[in-house]
Amino acid sequence: MARIAFIGLGNMGGGMAANLANAGHDVRAFDLVEEALERAEARGCKRAASAAEAVADAEAVVTMLPAGKHVRDVYESAVIGTAPASAILIDCSTIDVATAREEIEKARAAGYAMVDAPVSGGIAAAEGGTLTFMVGGTDEAFARAEPFLTAMGKAVIHAGAAGAGQAAKICNNMLLGASMIATCETFVMAGKLGLDLQTFFDISSKASGQCWSMTSYCPVPGVGPETPADRDYEGGFAAALMLKDLRLAMEAAQSVDAYTPMGDHAETLYTRFSDLGGGGKDFSAIIKMIDDSWQRPAGAGAPPLPPGVQLD
Ligand code: NAD
């Protein structure tokens, strides 16, 4: 069993670190937040006083941080040059492709193997050890990271070279954001044309319009399988996180001069929904903005965004 440094014990990292400890690893955990450290300790991890202390004699370093700037700060101040050069470095955060590539290159130049390994699946999957990891890096780095990722997930896929994990993640989520909006507007129009929505679901889910946003995650309450729509759009994947990923996707599209009109429009619509206070709801709740039934939450401004999510 390995000595693992785990940095970033928030909504996702807390469960992931606990799963590594449950698998028998010696997990040295660090977060800036005291309660996160206490929770990790209660779940079998050892508390470290700093990121540098956590990585000091680590065989693997896993990070699960909010955004690119946090990843850059942690790797450049406390991991690269501090962890043993034999440690495999694994960043599971969702960040921009450019920063992922830069940090992997800096790590490589300092003698480390590193992968970007963002996840698909939310807090429940992090707790249950059923995440899907999309991994970017060399074959050798992937092979070294894989056993640790397997302890936290149900699928670990080598997406390609450094940054390919982040690229796969934002391409997938750009498609998801656009297809969710298309599904929402289609159901709203079907209703206005007098179609029974369950009947329309039965038809379209077996016809050429079917897609995951309809068949597995239908935004209409009471139609299709049980989804966040049946729980007033609570739980699931927050609209604010979808917006974060769409912004990363648009940044990446610009950097390679890719024409992404649907992704661009999805970003505009999720920005509007977030401005209307919808960021804390599941991303399928955008149907309520489309059918004009959304009511801005009472009180001063929008509900708090999920921790770690900053929209600017
Ligand atoms: P979170 O804000 O709950 O957790 C991030 C943690 O990092 C916090 O506890 C914070 O204190 C800690 N942190 C920040 N800077 C630090 C530093 N310098 N040193 C140590 N700790 C530091 O966020 P989360 O929901 O766990 O998400 C983490 C990442 O996973 C994000 O990139 C997010 O986009 C991605 N993600 C989240 C979900 C989800 O459903 N929450 C799903 C898929 C991917």
Image: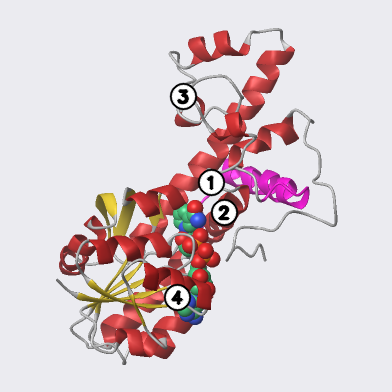
Circle 2 sits on which residue? 241
- Image location (x, y in percent) of residue 6: 35, 74
Give the crowd class for mark 2: few <14, some 14-19, many >=20 residues within 10 Å. many
Residue closer to the observer: 41 or 3: 41
Q: CA distance from mark 4 to mark 1?
A: 25 Å
Q: Which residue is under mark 1?
A: 237
Residue 41 is situated, as x and y percent measured from the top left of the image, at 38, 73
Residue stretch in magenta: 256-279
Report the side of 195 relative to 216 (left or right).
right
Q: Earlier in the sequence, mark 4 or mark 2?
A: 4
Tell me whether circle 4 and circle 1 mark residues in contact (CB < 8 Å).
no
Asked whether 37 or 70 is in front, the reply is 37
Q: Which residue is mark 4?
A: 37
Between discs 3 and 2, the one toward the N terminus: 3
C-alpha separation, residue under disc 3 versus residue under disc 2: 22 Å
- Type of residue at label 2? Leu
The vertical placement of 184 against 78, above or below, is above
Q: Amino acid at mark 4?
A: Leu
Q: CA distance from mark 2 to mark 1?
A: 7 Å
Residue, far front: 42
Q: Does label 2 point to a residue whose CB lies under 8 Å from ligand 1? A: yes
- Give the alpha-carbon distance from disc 3 to disc 1, as whole Å: 17 Å
Q: Earlier in the sequence, mark 4 or mark 1?
A: 4
